[in-house]
Image (spheres, grey):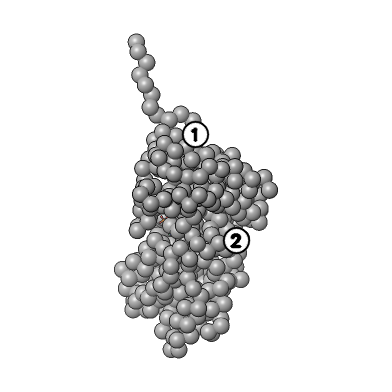
Amino acid sequence: MTAQANTKPRGRQFFNNPGPTNIPDRILRAMDRPVVDFLAPEFLEIQRSCFAGLKRVMKTDGEIFVHASTGHGAWEAAVANVFSPGDLVLIIESGHFSNGWQEMGEALGLKVEMLKADWRKGVDFESLNKRLADDKNHEIKGVFTVHNETATGMMLPLAEVRRALDATKHPAMLLSDTISSLVSMDYKMDAWGVDVTVAGSQKGLMMPTGLAITGVSKKAMEASRHSKMPKYYFNWALMAARMPQKFIGTVPVHQFFGLHESLKMIDEEGLDAIFARHNRLAEATRECVRAWSKDGKGPTLYGQTKERLSDSVTTIMMPEGHTSDAMRKIALERFNLSLGGGLGPLSGKVFRIGHLGDLNEPMLLGCLATTELAMKVAGVPFASGGVDAAIKSLAS
Ligand code: PLP
């Protein structure tokens, strides 16, 4: 008998997408258990502890609502509970995901104005100040922000957005999408005066996809009592009345088992240590890319504003004449490394390295070295010394 060639790559996949992210074995094991009644006291205690943990990671005393949905559900819940059809909202443009929220807002009947921004540099706060100051009659009811734009790898300084609202004494609600920043980069919902925080389970929380999480301030809760947007499953008031489970429909108990373990792991490591780890891994990735491009021919950092580069994802621009998808295909099919692709207009032009969630130095170095290998096979030019630069950064 002749042995058949096995073309399936061996070993564990290196997974560096910016979401979903690696799920730690501890979380998988915590979910691997028999079902329980969601009204059983044992489960209600797990759920209560999850809500308390989510408040800790969002740094809020506000309300928490959890839906069985992807992050899109949290976007929809935020729009449907706080606003009424015809309300004007201002969205700070950041990239693919700010534009997705715009599309949803319009579909639900909001009047949406985009505050234009260069995707590579991020918004210019002068233009935000001016637009808010010009809105003398306070027609703008909400300012939507994406704290970390997963498509471009750029972070939006939310304290600056709060400052602009305060400086102009503008009463608009502040909404923030933290889907790719929560538990990876510092986020202070109450200190920054954010009224609605939108999050998902599959990134910094290291969980399977499927929980949409919203943090809601008192002001937003109050607004939800007057909102005329049709809603049922996403209705916060209805959920709040469904005690003790605070949930509409069957509670996904296994997702809560996983979330409970995730929050335990987060408490053990500590939020500040988690942010420092993300910053270390991000800085090493950036140093690697800077080395690749030092002769002017290799891939470059997409983001151009140094202090706004994301600690959870790095977006990397391909050199002229090379598509990221060909290189990513080689990385995945030959070397079992999964990298993120470009989204929307950046499709094929960039690739993304996710360095968030359950990740350490060897995993990142494996990813960077294998990206070099895939680039070499794909014929993508790059200067040598990228991995060395990452090692130097990590060792310092
Ligand atoms: N917002 C941001 C910043 C994201 O990164 C994503 C997904 O990657 C979403 C919204 C949409 O979330 P979901 O895919 O869970 O619906």
* 16 vs 186, nearest the viewer: 16
Residue 298 vertical placement versus 120 (above, below)? above
Say whether mark 1 is within 8 Å of ligand 1. no
Q: Specify the quarter for ligand 1.
A: bottom left
Residue type of the residue flagged with mark 2: Asp
* Residue under the point 48% across and 66% down: 121
Q: Which residue is mark 1?
A: 12
Give the image location of residue 29, x and y in percent. Answer: 54, 39
**Between disc 1 and disc 2, whose residue precedes?**
1
Tags 1 and 2 touching, CB below 8 Å: no
| Label 1 CA crowd tier, 10 Å (few <14, some 14–19, many 20+) | few
Residue 152 vertical placement versus 367 (above, below)? below
Identify the secondary structure beneath mark 2: loop
| Label 2 CA crowd tier, 10 Å (few <14, some 14–19, many 20+) | some
Left or right of 321, for residue 290: right
Please say whether residue 176 is visible from this viewpoint. yes
Which numbered marker is on residue 66?
Answer: none
- Marks 1 and 2, how far apart at CA: 30 Å
Which residue occupies the extreme bottom position in the image?
Answer: 136
Q: Which residue is mark 2?
A: 186
Give the image location of residue 146, x and y in percent. Answer: 47, 65
* 79 vs 117, nearest the viewer: 117
* Residue under the point 42% across and 81% down: 140
Give the image location of residue 101, x and y in percent. Answer: 39, 65
Identify the secondary structure beneath mark 1: loop
Residue type of the residue flagged with mark 1: Arg
Residue 175 vertical placement versus 38 (above, below)? below
* Residue under the point 53% across and 50% down: 294
Left or right of 85, for residue 14: right
Give the image location of residue 168, x and y in percent. Answer: 53, 84
* Residue 186, picture quadrant: bottom right
| Quadrant in which the N terminus appears | top left
